Every structure is written in C-alpha cells, then in structure tokens.
Amino acid sequence: MKLENVQDAVLVRQYLEGNEKGIEVLIIRHKQRIYNFIFSKVLDRDISEDIFQDTFIKVIRTLKKGKYNEEGKFLPWVMRIAHNLVIDHFRRNKRMPKFQSRNDFDIFDVISDGEESMEYEMITFQMHEDVRRLIEELPEDQKEVLVMRIFKEMSFKEIAAATHVSINTALGRMRYALINLRKVIDKNQIILTR
Amino acid sequence: MAQLYNESFPEPVKPMVPKEETVKFLLDFSKALSVTRYKNMTFETLNN
C-alpha cells in the first residue's frame, strides 16, 4: 500500500516508530492548506513561510517527544499550532511596529520634513485671497454671519445675540451665504483645492 | 465582440505552497532531531 493513500493517524504512528517518510507525506499532503491558512491571515509570503516552518518544527518536536495525543485529528492540531503562531506574530508586531518598503509603496512618498514648500505656501495664499474676495461679494447680512461663524468661531447663539436676530435667522443667513458662495465658485470655475 | 472577450483569459491562479527549500529544511530537521529521555527529563539533540 502506498504511503500517499494511508491515513494521517497511520502516518503519525509510522513516524513515531522511526519512519521519516511518514512526516514527509504528512507535510506534502497538508502543506498547501496550512500555508494558505497562514497566508490568509498575515498576507505576506515571507512571513507565511516563516510561520509555516515554525509550525512544523513544533509539530516535529512534539511528535518526537511523544507528547502528541492521537485522536485522528492531525490536521486540526497542526492548524491550531499555526493559528497560535499567527497570533504570536501579530502580538510581536503590535509591540514592535515596522514599516517595510514595497515596490508599489514607499514610506518616503508620504512623509515630509514638516515644512511646506514655497509652491504650497503660494497656492494656499492664493486660495485664501480668492475666498476673501468671494466673501466680499456677499450681501452684508450674510457676510456678517459667515465671518462671525468661520473666522471668529462664534456659536449661532452668540451670532444671533450680536446681530439682534433669532438663531433661526442667523442659521438661514449662514445657509444662504454658503449657497451663494458655491454658486459664485461654480459660475467662475474657481478651484479651491491644492 | 465575442472575440474581444475571448482574447484575454485571466491568468490561472497558481496554488500557493511553501518553498521547496522550506519543506526540505523541515525534513532535514526531522532527521537530525533526536530526543533522549532520562527519568522524567527530555533532551533534544540535533545531529548534523
């Protein structure tokens, strides 16, 4: 009878009796399933390879020490070992976060020295100028509310008190101020993004 | 139109398996590892 057709439990027993072919057949039989299980969790081929290797090192050591209780469940046992090692990996990584550069992503694309470039500053300045000009075009009551709300960061209750109107009127003026600003921006195709 | 659809078949998905050298390492490790018991103690030895 070919070893490839023999049940896991029999292969384990043969391995424990000294037949190295037993573990070879077991690894080859289950390698794809276990590897895919690990990969589905860690999503990295190198890490999957390491965890797969550690899983079977643990399997081999446990078997050789005679600490394995055969209940006909070799694969679930190996999967549980792999699962525990995946958890260990995530625990370790949480303690020591690391960033790896890949072909499609480089950390230096997204980090900067914290200072804005001159071009960036000029665009920002231009945008602020455009917004100021647009606000100047608004009717006086709407402009007043918008300035108090956005630039002075006043609450609508405070704005209502300062302009001697109800809160609902202040809210309505703010709403119309924003609608009118959007209309002017759309009409003149002004770009306010960097 | 049908021809257009048939022109590019998706790449067949290769099953993901560990590298050959990983499996070979494990088999070599298994052969090299010997466990000796003395009373209630266990000793592991790697014979290269």
Image: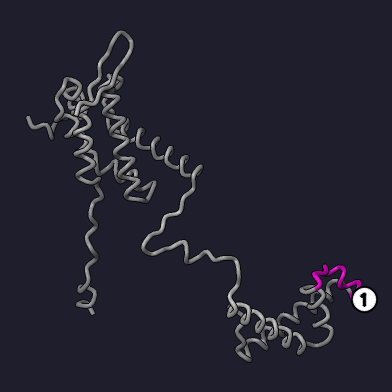
Q: Is residue A156 magenta?
A: yes
Q: Image check: A61 left or right of A133?
A: left
Element class at badge 1: loop
* Residue drawn at the location 84% of the way across and 76% of the way down: A169
Query: Which quadrant would the C terminus of chain B be assigned to in this image?
Result: top left
Specify start and end residues of the magenta stretch as a single range.
Answer: A152-165
Residue A112 spot, x, y in % from top left: 54, 66
* Residue drawn at the location 19% of the way across and 77% of the way down: B3
**Picture layout, residue A73 above or below residue A150:** above
Residue A179 spot, x, y in % from top left: 70, 82
**Amino acid bearing label 1:** His
Seen as rendered, the residue at the extreme bottom is A188
* Residue drawn at the location 22% of the way across and 60% of the way down: B12
User: A149 or A169: nearer the eye?
Assistant: A149
Q: Is residue A102 magenta?
A: no
Query: Which quadrant would the N terminus of chain B be assigned to in this image?
Result: bottom left
Which residue is labeled 1 in the image? A164
Q: Image check: A19 left or right of A194?
A: left
* Residue drawn at the location 25% of the way across and 23% of the way down: B45
**Picture layout, residue B35 above or below residue A88:** above
Res A5 → quadrant: top left
Seen as rendered, the residue at the extreme left is A1
Q: Image check: B44 left or right of A41?
A: left
Residue A148 spot, x, y in % from top left: 82, 75
**Picture layout, residue A98 above or below residue A78:** below
Subunit under mark 1: A
